[in-house]
Image (cartoon, grey):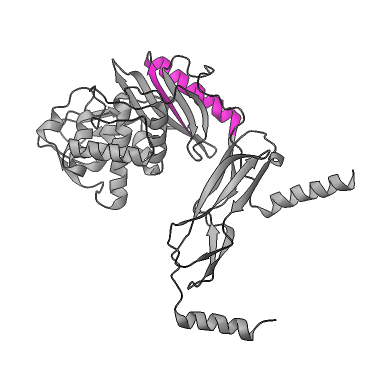
């Protein structure tokens, strides 16, 4: 072995020893739009890694199409966010309006004046695709379905869902109500940031009104949660215009996937093609960790601040999707951040980013934020700091 080669080998080893883990590249086997390897029968499709947002496969993923009851993913998202904010509780009682009770299509047969908890309505939305339950919870959160739909569209805009316009909260056919496979994957990924939602979307059967004279047996419209290992959501959809649609998720060995198909000819084909998408991704890809949550990535000097140093750490575990068996030797990463900043610094302020390369090509960037506020230092703090430099210099 030549001296130059020996030095290069040691450098590579040191690189992957110093950093807590090799960041992954975007999968080299991504199938781009137009490729019909997967989801042949779907009008539109996408396959995404939920953790990193890496697109593994897509087919006409930005085509605007009727989403049918997949619309309810946004309804569930706003519900989970309201619960997280504390403005809504699972135990809150919701009184059904005449309007909510009048919804046709799939429903849990709410009667005007009937009360259910938010917990029960979530079961009705996630499992039975209840149009009436969706409107009832929309009215509880926003006062009216119209006001709730405005919140839906505002949230869609915040998430960058440029192919989407909601006209109702349940997906019943209406003019100019549309989304795309890509946008549905985006809102599905956001919903999965509330992992407790899979308690509802992943259950195969349950009951409503169980201890009454009118018990209602719930059976999940998404049969994959029973028949596909690791599947635990998210939402089916069907109208004569939209045909058979599904936004599905499954998790194995720490890898969570999101698959969306729109415009499938029947449920058998829909389920089969989504299963094939999952099979493909689980067999070909894995997640590689970069940093664990809380692990320090770098430091930035702070001028005239109460603290003189800001530590940049991983707010959550940072992973990257890679092909199984991919060599880490082609993967490098670096911290791009200023050497020093002037106070004040606000919590959540973008400070720098971690850039990941594969063979000198940028494949992923992680934004890094300040974990806490750093206010300007008062004169006494600055005096003590200056004095320490004056009298304790080596």
The residue lying furthest to the right in this view is 2
* Residue 87, above or below 107: below
Residue 279, magenta (yes or no) = yes
The residue depicted at 26 percent of the width and 24 percent of the height is: 176
- Residue at point 70%, 39% (across, down): 330
Q: Quadrant of residue 295?
A: bottom right
Is 43 in front, or is 363? 363
Q: Is residue 334 above or below residue 237?
A: below
Residue 325 horizontal/vertical position (percent): 67, 34
The quadrant of the picture occupied by the N terminus is top right
Residue 191, position as x, y percentages in the image: 37, 39
Horizontal relation, residue 115 to residue 16: left or right: left
Is residue 297 visible from the viewing direction of this image? yes
Q: Which residues are magenta?
A: 257-285
Quadrant in which the C terminus appears: bottom right
Residue 157 highlighted magenta (yes or no): no
Quarter-of-image position of residue 319: top right
Side of 48 where 101 appears, left or right:
left
**Residue drawn at (80%, 46%) of the image:** 9
237 or 45: nearer the eye? 45
| Residue 111 in view here | no
Q: Position of residue 120 (x, y in %)?
A: 24, 38
Q: Main secondary structure of the magenta part?
A: helix
């Amino acid at each position: 072995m030549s001296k130059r080669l020996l030095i290069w080998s040691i450098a590579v080893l040191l690189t992957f020893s110093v950093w807590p883990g090799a960041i992954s590249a975007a999968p080299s086997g991504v199938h781009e739009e137009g490729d019909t390897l997967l989801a042949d029968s779907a009008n539109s499709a996408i396959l995404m890694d939920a953790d990193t947002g890496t697109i593994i496969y897509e087919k006409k993923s930005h085509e605007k199409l009727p989403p049918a009851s997949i619309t309810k993913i946004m309804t569930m998202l706003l519900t989970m966010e309201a619960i997280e904010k504390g403005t809504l509780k699972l135990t809150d009682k919701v009184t059904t309006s005449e309007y909510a009770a009048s919804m046709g299509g799939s429903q849990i047969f709410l009667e005007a004046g009937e009360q259910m908890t938010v917990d029960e309505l979530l079961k009705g939305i996630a499992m039975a695709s209840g149009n009436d339950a969706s409107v009832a919870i929309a009215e509880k959160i926003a006062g009216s379905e119209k006001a709730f739909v405005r919140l839906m569209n505002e949230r869609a805009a915040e998430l960058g869902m440029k192919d989407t316009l909601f006209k109702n909260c349940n997906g019943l056919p209406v003019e100019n109500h549309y989304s795309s496979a890509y946008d549905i994957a985006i809102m599905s990924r956001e919903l999965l940031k509330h992992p407790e939602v899979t308690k509802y979307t992943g259950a195969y059967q349950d009951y409503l009104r169980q201890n009454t004279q009118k018990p209602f047996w719930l059976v999940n419209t998404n049969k994959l949660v029973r028949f596909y290992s690791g599947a635990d959501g998210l939402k089916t959809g069907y109208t004569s215009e939209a045909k058979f649609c599904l936004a599905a998720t499954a998790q194995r060995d720490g890898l969570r996937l999101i698959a969306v198909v729109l415009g499938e000819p029947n449920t058998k084909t829909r389920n089969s093609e989504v299963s094939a998408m999952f099979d493909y991704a689980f067999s070909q890809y894995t997640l590689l960790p970069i940093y664990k949550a809380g692990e320090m990535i770098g430091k930035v000097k702070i001028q005239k601040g109460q603290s003189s140093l800001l530590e940049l750490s991983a707010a959550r575990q940072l992973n990257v999707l890679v092909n199984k068996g991919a060599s880490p030797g082609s993967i490098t990463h670096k911290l791009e951040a200023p050497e020093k900043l002037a106070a004040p610094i606000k919590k959540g302020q973008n400070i720098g980013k971690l850039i990941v390369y594969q063979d000198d090509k940028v494949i992923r960037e992680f934004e890094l934020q300040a974990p806490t506020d750093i206010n300007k230092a008062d004169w006494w703090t600055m005096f003590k700091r200056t004095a320490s430099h004056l009298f304790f210099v080596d």
